[in-house]
Image (cartoon, grey):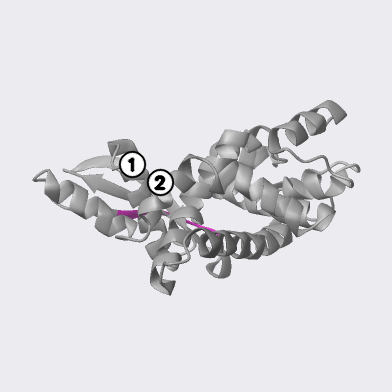
């Protein structure tokens, strides 16, 4: 990445790195390692993604506890699931334009890696870790609030104290005399210990929305959220 590209991305995410190497590592996909230049990180973003996932869970959990003191543990878990899932995170990454800055190998580039939800979600979580390691928890908290929690997705989580996304979608469809959606795994990516599932939800026999997650259940919930958003049901 050029100096101008780094500055451009830092402006988009609202954080200027003291050590830009954290930013570069957050964007470094494993496919790039065999082709990396001397200026690029020697490690992929996988370790940062692991750390960022934990930091994100902590920050979102804390915000929900503070914002909704009357919610039960079950309601809090549902609220967090609405905010912290592969679909929501990849959408946040898309809004930041992270795909334009990913460091990818030629093969991954050719197969559309810059738009793959799983790669975008991983990069977003790695970026959280990079900010945390560069400037601490408060800096990471500010980034998460600006780009995920305080945005449109957070507003849609207001109904998190109610039904889970799959149930909410079913209730929405039933209220309109439609059959429940059906869920189908269309792709499994990665090794068994780091597998990502992509699930399609079909409504009235038609392809409605896609979701991804670390488990089939999480991917189904993500697909349900995407379908609710497309149907305009999430704000109701």
Residue 235: which numbered mark, if any?
Answer: 1
Q: In the image as oriented, which residue stretches furthest toward the front?
A: 70
Q: Residues within 10 Å of mark 2 (few under 14, many from 20)?
A: some
User: Does the stretch in magenta take in 80?
Assistant: no
The residue located at (33%, 37%) in the rendering is 230
Residues drawn in magenta: 184-190
Query: Where does residue 116 sit, x and y in percent of width and height?
Result: 53, 42
Look at the numbered discs 2 and 1 and tell me whether their residues touch, using CB distance below 8 Å: yes
Alpha carbon distance from label 2 to label 1:
6 Å
Q: In the image as oriented, which residue stretches furthest toward the left?
A: 177
Query: Where does residue 52 sit, x and y in percent of width and height?
Result: 67, 59
Query: Where does residue 156 sit, x and y in percent of width and height?
Result: 40, 46
Q: How many marks?
A: 2
Main secondary structure type of the part rendered in magenta: strand
Sequence-earlier tag: 2 or 1: 2
- The quarter in which the C terminus is drawn is top left
Q: In the rendered image of this protein, does residue 190 appear above or below residue 127? A: below
The residue located at (26%, 54%) in the rendering is 168
Residue 156: which numbered mark, if any?
Answer: 2
Q: In the rendered image of this protein, does residue 3 appear above or below residue 78? A: above
């Amino acid at each position: 990445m050029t100096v101008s590209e780094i500055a451009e991305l830092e402006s988009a995410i609202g954080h200027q790195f003291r050590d830009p190497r954290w930013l570069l590592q957050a964007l470094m996909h494993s496919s790039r390692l065999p082709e990396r230049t001397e200026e690029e990180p020697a490690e992929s973003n996988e370790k940062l993604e692991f750390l960022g996932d934990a930091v994100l869970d902590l920050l979102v959990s804390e915000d929900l506890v503070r914002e909704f003191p009357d919610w039960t543990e079950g309601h809090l878990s549902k609220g967090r699931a609405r905010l912290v899932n592969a679909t929501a995170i990849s959408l946040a990454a898309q809004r930041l334009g992270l795909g334009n800055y990913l460091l990818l190998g030629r093969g991954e580039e050719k197969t559309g890696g810059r738009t793959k939800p799983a790669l975008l979600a991983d990069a977003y979580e790695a970026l959280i870790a990079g900010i945390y390691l560069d400037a601490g928890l408060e800096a990471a908290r500010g980034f998460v609030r600006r780009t995920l929690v305080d945005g449109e997705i957070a507003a849609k989580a207001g109904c998190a104290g109610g039904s889970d996304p799959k149930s909410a979608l079913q209730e929405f469809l039933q209220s309109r005399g439609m059959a429940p959606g059906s869920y189908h795994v269309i792709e499994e990516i990665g090794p068994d210990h780091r597998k990502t599932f992509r699930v399609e939800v079909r409504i009235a026999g038609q392809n409605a929305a896609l979701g991804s997650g670390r488990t089939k259940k999480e991917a189904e919930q993500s697909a349900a959220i995407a379908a609710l958003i497309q149907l305009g049901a999430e704000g109701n």
